Image (spheres, rainbow, N blue to C red):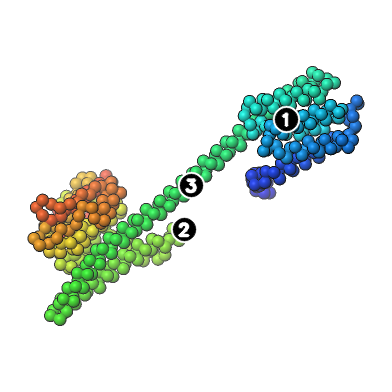
Amino acid sequence: MVAQAALWPRCLRRLVGRHPLLVDGLLATATVAVGLALASQQPPAGVRPMDLRGYVLTCLLGALLVARQRAPMAVLVLYCAVWAGYIGLGYWPVVNSPGMLLALYTVAAKRRVRTAVTAVVIAAAVWVYAGHDSLLVAVVQGVAWTAVIAWIGHGAGQLAASNQRLARVAQQLEYEQEQRARRAVVEERVRIARELHDVVAHHMSVISVQAGLARYVLATDPQTARTALGTVLETSGEALDELRRLLSLLRLNVDGAGEESGSYAPAPGLDQLDELVQRVRAAGVRVEVTTTGTPRSLPPGADLCAYRVIQESLTNVLKHAPLAAATVALHYARDLLTARIRDDGTPGAPRSGTAEGHGLVGMRERAHLYGGTLTAGPQSTGGFEVVLTLPIPAMVDEERAAPGRDLT
């Protein structure tokens, strides 16, 4: 019952907003009904009894109220003029006073204070004219009633204007929330696209090199061909696993749980650097990895960032400088990780990248996302170098390896 009662004000607001003319017609009809009910009573002594002309004037005054929302001041002035004529004919003024108060309320709610004051003066003047038998009582009642009704109408108008402003603000906030949600979706798609780029570019480069090697030595060195094909099979399987894990993020249920999300391995990090280096070495690129400082665990996002930057850099070496030798140097300072990936610029080997390649732009965005920096470019001594720096939080996990570990 309480819930149903709470719905009534909301339904009324919807009805007023969608059908204002219908609501005004109903109020005008109700006002006429009240006036006719008053007219059916015994009028005071000396007042002209209601006749056909009085009923017609009462209905006319009620009809004027239908237009009170569209032209409040005009309706009030015309209503007071007809009401004054009605009073001049000797009819009982109280019969049509509710309609005048309703018209005055509308002016105060819809128009400025100056217009409302003018409306109060006009309505009070007609009220005083209606009370010619007791001028003092008429003045007091006329001023008091019209001032109170105007004050209530003005407050209602201010409240309605405030509600409209709040509704606009709420609508704007809802729009901004939708825009933020759309941007979040776009950013998530860009992140997944970047992950797919890293996965596909690295693994397909390895697969392409190994498949070419297997084709080249298939007739002369079957054992090397089998080894190369085994690397192709293993690399393609790893690529498919990572693609499944990433694409599973796109199939989230409403409650946020992914389909079979538990069947996929966690995102790679520096703890899988050995496997990455072995895969690149199997593709024919000489890679040396050194670690200095005290290795520490990074947050998952930063760990993935470091892994992807190294993966992308080695993939560029594999694609653009397959004759070069590469080095990956990791240095752990107290609050900073520095990863330096460099190829030696072997004569006859093309450079491993350009400073504005799409892969390097994505790496730079990754570094900025986690508060780090990334620089990349050719070296004066030959070759290409990528330098990544990532901050290490003060609170870190326990050390995951001994200081000075050499992965070569």
Q: Residue at x 15, y 62 (%)?
A: 321
Marks 2/3 in contact by CB < 8 Å: the verdict is: no
Q: What amino acid is labelled 1 in the image?
A: Val
Q: What amino acid is labelled 2 in the image?
A: Asp
Q: Element type at marker 1?
A: helix
Q: Which label is found at residue 187?
A: none
**Which percent across, then down, holds residue 198?**
27, 60
Q: Residue furthest top?
A: 136
Q: Element type at marker 3?
A: helix
Q: Which residue is mark 3?
A: 175
With 232 as the anchor, is 190 left or right in this view?
A: right
Q: Residues within 10 Å of mark 1 (few under 14, many from 20)?
A: some
- In the image, residue 243 above or below residue 401: below
Quote the CA–CA distance across marks 1 and 3: 43 Å
Quote the CA–CA distance across marks 1 and 2: 62 Å
Please say whether residue 354 is visible from this viewpoint: yes
Quote the CA–CA distance across marks 2 and 3: 24 Å
Q: Residue at x 48, y 47 (%)?
A: 175
Of discs 1 and 2, which sits in the foreground?
Answer: 1
Of discs 1 and 3, which sits in the foreground?
Answer: 1
Q: Which residue is mark 1?
A: 77
Q: What amino acid is labelled 3 in the image?
A: Tyr
With 173 as the anchor, is 152 left or right in this view?
A: right
Q: Which label is found at residue 255?
A: 2
Q: Quadrant of residue 272?
A: bottom left
Q: Quadrant of residue 257?
A: bottom left
